Amino acid sequence: MTQNLQSHLGIHALAVDTDGIDGTEDAAGAIVSPAALARAREAGLDARHFLTRHDSYSFFAAVDCLIRTGPTLLNVNDFRAILIL
């Protein structure tokens, strides 16, 4: 998804799990923003590379966009939100 957003500066997206962790990872999810994509470009990170390895965690960790809430003990559902400015 991130590579498709490179030219759309008004799009922000959030993907988190309500239980506070995603699978076995320590993060609930991540947020994508124009600033995050700029940091990825500056760092020379290629989102496609991480996607082919099924490793979005490392990509979002590298651009400081992981959301860590800790366990919430509430597993309602996954939550996704997109803001288009």
Image (cartoon, grey):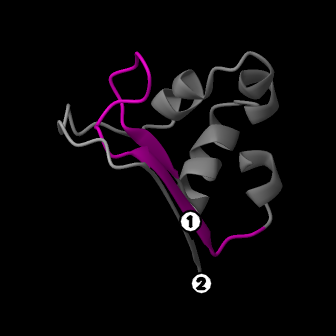
- Relative to 15, 72 lies left or right: left
Q: Position of residue 20 (x, y in %)?
A: 28, 37
> What is the secondary structure assignment of the residue under circle 2?
loop
Q: Which of 26 and 34 is in front in this view?
A: 26
Q: Is residue 33 found inside the magenta-colored segment of the image?
A: no
Q: Which mark is residue 21?
A: none
Q: Where is residue 58 in the image (x, y as percent from the top left)?
A: 54, 22
User: In the rendering, which numbered label is found on residue 85?
Assistant: 2
Within-10-Å neighbours for mark 2: few <14, some 14–19, many 20+:
few
Which percent across, then down, holds residue 76? 33, 49
Task: Assess whether residue 18 is covered by the magenta stretch.
Answer: yes
Is residue 65 visible to the viewer in this orientation of the structure? no
Looking at the image, residue 64 sits to the left or right of residue 85; the answer is left
Q: In this view, does 26 lie to the left or right of 13?
A: left
Measured along the vertical axis of the image, is residue 47 above or below residue 79? Answer: above
Distance from Cα at disc 2 to Cα at disc 1? 8 Å
Q: Residue 12 carries which label?
A: 1
Which amino acid does the dot numbered 2 rest on?
Leu
SS at circle 1: strand
Q: What stretch is highlighted in magenta?
A: 8-31
Of residue 20 and residue 68, the one placed in the foreground of this image is 20
Residue drawn at (55%, 50%) of the image: 36
Question: Badge 1: few (under 14), some or many (20 or more) residues near its Cα, within 10 Å?
Answer: some
- For badge 1, the amino acid type reads His
Q: How many labels does the image show?
A: 2
Asked where in the image residue 64 lies, by quadrant, the reply is top left
Would you place residue 10 above or below residue 76 in this image? below
